Image (cartoon, coloured by chain):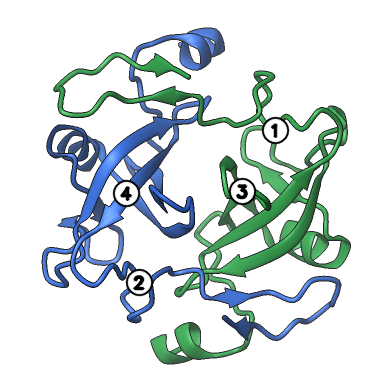
Chain colours: A green, B blue
Amino acid sequence: MHDKDLEEGSSLTPRFDASGLITAIVADEKTGEVLMLAHMNADALTRTIETREGWFWSRSRKSLWKKGESSGNVLRVSEMKIDCDQDAVLLKVSVTGDGKTCHTGRRSCFYRSIPLGKANPALTFD
Amino acid sequence: MHDKDLEEGSSLTPRFDASGLITAIVADEKTGEVLMLAHMNADALTRTIETREGWFWSRSRKSLWKKGESSGNVLRVSEMKIDCDQDAVLLKVSVTGDGKTCHTGRRSCFYRSIPLGKANPALTFD
């Protein structure tokens, strides 16, 4: 496929990587806060589009996975975007249950900062 | 490394994938808008931390790449976060020049929506 079709076309033609995956960024629909990053195979992508709930592929468990199936923190998807080269999607969501998306019990997986300007920074917690 | 050290420790111990890369999400520091997604090897990560400007690894060109080197749209990084399992970072940035991050000339790479609830959706443009 030509770059122009990929970037300027209206066909959904995801560019799955060698493992059959694209990257999915999950952000809060109200605040824009980035909550988590995960991966989707073709099946997870299709299920997410059709059901409006977040489905992913677990690389560690090698299995399809509906976010919130055990925790109750289901991702209700209100908007889904794909990037220029169609290898990443952005999901705007509301989170059901107690609103946490990180398996560590935090709202977001991005809870540690890397101090800038230092050669060997120690992480700081939010 | 145990999960607990990885997730709850203050050591920066990025989990690079088989290609030596972690994923980097770039978001606007003011609005939180997700602008682009790219990848970093260890060198790009170190340079970004030390210079506070966005450096990446181009998988297609197989080379280190400073965002904005040719376009003038340098990413000034004000905040950098790492996720629970240390295989993804989130950069909060301001963009120099005309503020565009996508090589197609748009502000964000995520300029097309995937309509939800349909089996074979056609993308819609912002």
How packed mark 3 is, by other alpha carbons closer than 10 Å (few <14, some 14-19, many 20 or more), is many
Q: Earlier in the sequence, mark 4 or mark 2?
A: 4
Chain of the residue under label 2: B
Task: Determine whether, in the image, residue B35 is placed left or right of residue B122.
Answer: left
How packed mark 2 is, by other alpha carbons closer than 10 Å (few <14, some 14-19, many 20 or more), is some
Instruction: Measure the C-alpha gap from mark 4 to mark 1.
Output: 24 Å
Numbered marks: total: 4
Chain of the residue under label 4: B
Q: Is residue A99 above or below residue A28?
A: above
How packed mark 1 is, by other alpha carbons closer than 10 Å (few <14, some 14-19, many 20 or more), is many
Dot 3 and dot 1 within a common chain: yes
Element class at badge 3: strand
Task: Determine whether, in the image, residue B46 is placed left or right of residue A98.
Answer: left
Q: According to the image, label 2 marks what residue?
A: B102
Percent x, y of residue B81: 40, 32
Instruction: Measure the C-alpha gap from mark 2 to mark 3.
Output: 19 Å
The residue positioned farthest toward the front in the image shown? B30
User: Which circle marks residue A27 in the picture?
Assistant: 3
Q: Amino acid at mark 2?
A: Cys
Q: Amino acid at mark 1?
A: Thr
**Quarter of the image where one finds residue B114:** bottom right
Element class at badge 1: loop
User: Which circle marks residue B93 in the picture?
Assistant: 4
Q: Is residue B25 above or below residue B63?
A: above
Q: Amino acid at mark 3?
A: Ala
The residue shown at (24%, 72%) is B98
Q: Is the residue under label 1 in contact with that under label 2 (CB below 8 Å)?
A: no
Instruction: Measure the C-alpha gap from mark 3 to mark 4.
Output: 17 Å
Q: Earlier in the sequence, mark 3 or mark 1?
A: 3
Q: According to the image, label 1 marks what residue?
A: A101
Percent x, y of residue B69: 11, 64
Dot 3 and dot 4 within a common chain: no
